[in-house]
Image (spheres, rainbow, N blue to C red):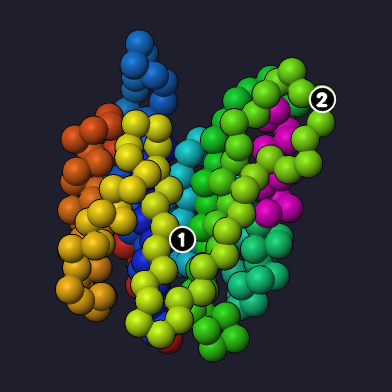
Amino acid sequence: MSLILIAAMEDYIIMMSDGRVSRGNDNEFHILDDNYKKLLRLNETICIGYGGSKEPCVEVVDYLKMYYKNEKDLDKLFNLLNQKAGNVFGNYISKGIKIKMQIVIGGINKGQIKFKTIKSIDYDFNKIYIKSYFTTEEHIPEGDTLSYCMMNPDGIEDLLFYKLLCRNTSFGVDDIKITMKECIDIASEKSRTINKNKFFEVIRR
């Protein structure tokens, strides 16, 4: 399930997603929804984006929405998210079902723009035990430096978003949104799991 883009400066964070939800592979590909927003504005200071396998991702995000909608401590929310995602991922693995989860949570944390990501690893069913199902990253923009991340499906070049951002002469909100839109348009030509419908959230400090 698709493409999530994140960009942040000291005074804002933007998340953008496409709108396609699909299932299957090249041999049996089905479009389930072409107008699905993969972003959740948890509250006025926190936003969550997610991609990969829809059902497990939604289970994790709905958990935060149900029980922690008013929580504004991003680090606490990330720990809860990471723990819940591990439980959900483990449940699928125990049933022999392979899934993919990519989740980002970002916004204003104690007066500072920040975002954190979790990405599931390719799990080997032959291994009895691994330390973690996920890799995690933390991004805190400082000064004039743009922090960015692209959560992309297989078949999309990992550096696509970076290469497009390198052309920017300005990192204002509107300029970044234009670059994000272009990135989604290009990616949609390379993967059937992505379409050109776009959704975004902006949080300003």
Residue tagged 1: 40
Q: Is residue 17 above or below residue 177?
A: above
Furthest toward the right, the residue is 128
Q: Which residue occupies 51% across, 68% down? A: 139
Q: Is residue 200 visible?
A: yes
Q: Which residue occupies 74% across, 18% down? A: 126
| Side of 131 relative to 107 (left or right) | right
Foreground: disc 1 or disc 2: 2
Query: In this picture, which residue range is highlighted in magenta?
Result: 82-93
Furthest toward the top, the residue is 27
Residue tagged 2: 128
Q: Is residue 44 visible?
A: no
Q: Is residue 110 above or below residue 13?
A: below
* Screen quadrant of the C terminus: bottom left
Q: Is residue 191 magenta?
A: no
Q: Earlier in the sequence, mark 1 or mark 2?
A: 1
Mark 2 is surrounded, within 10 Å at the Cα level, by few (under 14), some (14 to 19) or many (20 or more) other residues, namely: few
Residue 109 x %, y %? 57, 80
* Kind of residue sitting beneath label 1: Leu
